[in-house]
Image (cartoon, coloured by chain):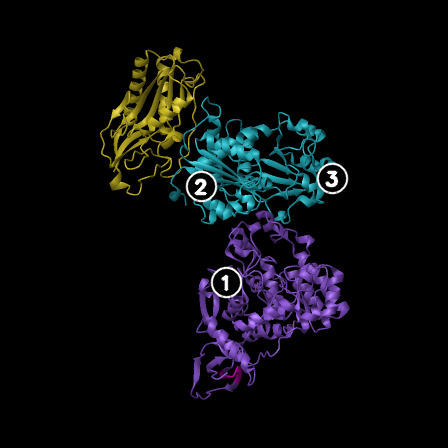
Chain colours: A purple, B cyan, C yellow
Amino acid sequence: MTVNTAYLIRGATLPQGTRADLLVQDARITAVGTNLDTGSGLTVIDADGLIALPGLVDLHTHLREPGFEQSETVLTGSRAAAAGGFTSVFAMANTLPVSDTAGVVEQVQALGDAAGYATVRPIGAVTVGLAGERLSEIGAMAHSRAQVRVFSDDGKCVHDSLLMRRALEYVRTFDGVVAQHAQDPRLTENAQMNEGALSSELGLKGWPAVAEESIIARDVLLAEHVGSRLHVCHVSTAGSVEVIRWAKSRGITVTAEATPHHLLLTEDLIRSYDARYKVNPPLRRDEDVRALREGLADGTIDIIATDHAPHPKESKEAEWDAASFGMVGLESALSVAQTALIDTGLLTWNDIARVLSQTPADIGRLADHSHCFEVGAPANFTLVDPSTTSTFDLARLAGKSTNSPYLGRTLSGRVEYTFHHGYPTVGAAAVRPADEVATAAAAWKAGN
Amino acid sequence: MRHLLTTKHLSRDAAIQILDVAEDMADVANREVKKLPALRGKTVVNLFFEDSTRTRISFEAAAKRLSADVINFSAKGSSVSKGESLKDTAQTLAAMGADAVVIRHQSSGAPQVLAESGWIDAPIVNAGDGTHEHPTQALLDAFTMRRRLYNGQSRGRDLDGVGVVIVGDILHSRVARSNLWLLETLGAHVTFVAPATLVPLGAETWPVAISYDLDATLAAEKPDVVMMLRIQSERMNAAFFPNAREYSREWGLDDVRFAALPTDTIVMHPGPMNRGLEISAAAADSAQSTVLEQVTNGVSIRMAALYLLLSGDREALL
Amino acid sequence: MARVVLSQADMQRALTRIAHEILESNKGAADLVILGIPTRGVYLAQRIAAIIQRIEPEATATVPGSGSAMVGALDATMYRDDLSRGRTRTPSPTQIPSGGVDGKTVVLVDDVLYSGRTIRAALDALNDIGRPRVVRLAVLIDRGHRELPIRADFVGKNLPTSTDERINVRLAELDGVEEVSIENRAAEHPEADTARGPGTSTSAPSTSEATS
């Protein structure tokens, strides 16, 4: 690469609250301090009032490619990630073909590298075709160029106890982790929403909390028994938080994620039968939302992960039973986190950096990730304006699908800049054009 | 009234208005000319995604007695069963100039989605959606109770203090839900009787008493009305109760239980009945039974609903 | 300000005269059916029937203690030509005496005759109930401004009005007072264009709320 633009970020507020100038050169942070020199050829960004966060890492994203490109592609999904301040996303395996071979995961990774909006780390399927019957080629995926470390049948639960035990044991061989979608299939046949008085009133088949909690309870005991680490996807109930808290107190190596929507929205929204609120696991009660927030605050829940699940319009413009499960969440995640956790005084920005960057990177064994703004760290970070409050609208969405539950809702904060490998993917609150980002990514790759 | 989607949000006054208008509609049925010109030139579409000949012909008779044109759109064997979306169907009906849509759908909330989507700007009548609601059934049940209890002096009256026991598959019953909300609004007190497997989760937070014991409830409550619900045969294969014999023994209105009822207790059933399962032939065919009156009254209630939805300036209704 | 044009005594005299005229034209009370048009026409019909009963008790004594063999109510709501406009109208009960209307002399009774559209609707409603030998119309007030070729056979008082005015018929049964007054609607009730309050019968020109 011949010309690499250097950036001086002037007066950003670091997660701990200190102010600093950041010098970005050759994809790295090359200086941190106050009143850094503005040499020639520098692009200066006035970050006064903006909070600098390490590049956000989403351990749970559905990029839909290959197979469901009408909903999202690796390009559009990673663009949505950049818009939300993310610099790395872990792409779930429920594509078509399923990401259960080295070939598919390498393809997904290559598409991510070419697009350049974010580091795309494929997640491998635990079982062949997500069928829950035979282990997929976990070793091949781990040793592929994609270096898969997270394995999940997300969308489906690895419900067979013996298979789950074997998966937990086998992935340990490759320093991997099983990310379990905890849902007892028999208890949730044709389930449509959280089971309770409201589902009974609305006539929608219930998805009982126990269907999640019983699987988590079994899995933490299995993890303890075989000494493997376990990651629990999208924890949604107060009871699940209790089970995980108990498991951690026993020293079981379990980590857990909560989605932004489960931290903000409740089942009452379903009174409208508006399918934008249809998601799996379903929106729960207010006391569940509170328990999840408290779980994040006390460390029982380790991370926030979006479960970004794009769907085309026709999948949501339908009667409730016929509509698809899922919500897009990358672009709104940080604003929701601020609204639900910062504005309520439960978490600090330093905590946000932990739950949305450092810990998910650790769980996913993300290489070359630093959550500290220190000299030599890779220049993956985002600058957020926490002072704005605005109505979340279509202009904030950067992916292919618009199935966001937040459209029309007032949320705090806004991502102003995102830097990935030292080049901007978002500048002045606007996503940079695809060709510009791809060129910068190619240049970075050539120089690396 | 802009749509009739639930009884949950129907006010007491609005409910009584429908019941009173239905009284006038019922009078028409006794005339030589059983037809009124009120909806001449209006087109009512019966959009049935789920088979229900009884409900469909009741709505059809109601619309025709009001001189409306009726189009029956059955999803079976049509483009709908070949994957056409609710949205496309609705827009097609709108393009054809449907003035009102009566919808029966297996998916709870589909009528509300239709009403609020903007795909079609016509009054929507819920003719039964999933396990959610069946408001015209509840209205005709209340109408039937009112007529029986007040002997022709029912205009303007509610059901204050009336005791109603609803027996059977509450879990899957939109009729039970719609009846509960409406009866509660009209001042009646309702008891659900069912095996615990067929009581909806969270029903203890509803304005209803819940019992598992039919005999004890009938003895203690001395209800004015006993409403038996249909047991669908598919429930028997899904472990809700062991078998039909046990169900009938515990929760059926058999001859012995029927004979023990006071002679002025009203026996209701929304139909179609499983004779010998949830209700004995003697009970169903007795003078206390309102099964056929319910069918007759269904037409009057649906006439009232269609009239109230389709007359007046739509813009003035909000 | 509303101006009283008929007092209680004036109304009583008018109804008595109408009752006599009906008997005279029908040559007695035989086969007479008096049907009031809701709301106030029903009460006026009952009063006319009561007067007839007093005049000819033997001819009307089929049902002891009331004139119900002769008097009833005919609701024309479902036959109106303006159901799609304005607010939704709730129908009132129709009550036909047990003898029916076939071959009878039916006298329709309403409080105010105005555009004539309600009477048109009432004639259609009556047609669906049976085939009277003859149909007559009695009104307490005829205020003019007809929009259809309809006229009253028995009139309590002809009251030339401007379309800006409204006629309030108040009856003891509904309103606690007994009088007919006239008021300038435009000046006093600019908002009352479509309102037909439960306590007052109004005749408004620009809307189809005109009672007759």
Q: Nearer the viewer, mark 1 or mark 2?
A: 1
Residue A61 x %, y % = 58, 66
Residue at far front of view: A103
- Tell me the residue that label 2 is attached to: B1
Viewer-side residue, A81 vs B25: A81
- Tell me the residue that label 3 is attached to: B243
Marks 3 and 2, how far apart at CA: 44 Å
- Tell me the residue that label 1 is attached to: A400
Instruction: Give, as a single range, the part of the protein colored magenta.
Output: A20-29
Residue B241 x %, y % = 72, 42
Name the residue: 28% across, 30% down. C115
Specify the subunit that label 3 lies on: B
Q: Is residue A95 visible?
A: yes
Question: Picture quarter containing residue A64?
Answer: bottom right
Kind of residue sitting beneath label 1? Lys
Kind of residue sitting beneath label 2? Met
Circles 3 and 2 on the same subunit = yes
Residue A287 counted in the magenta span: no
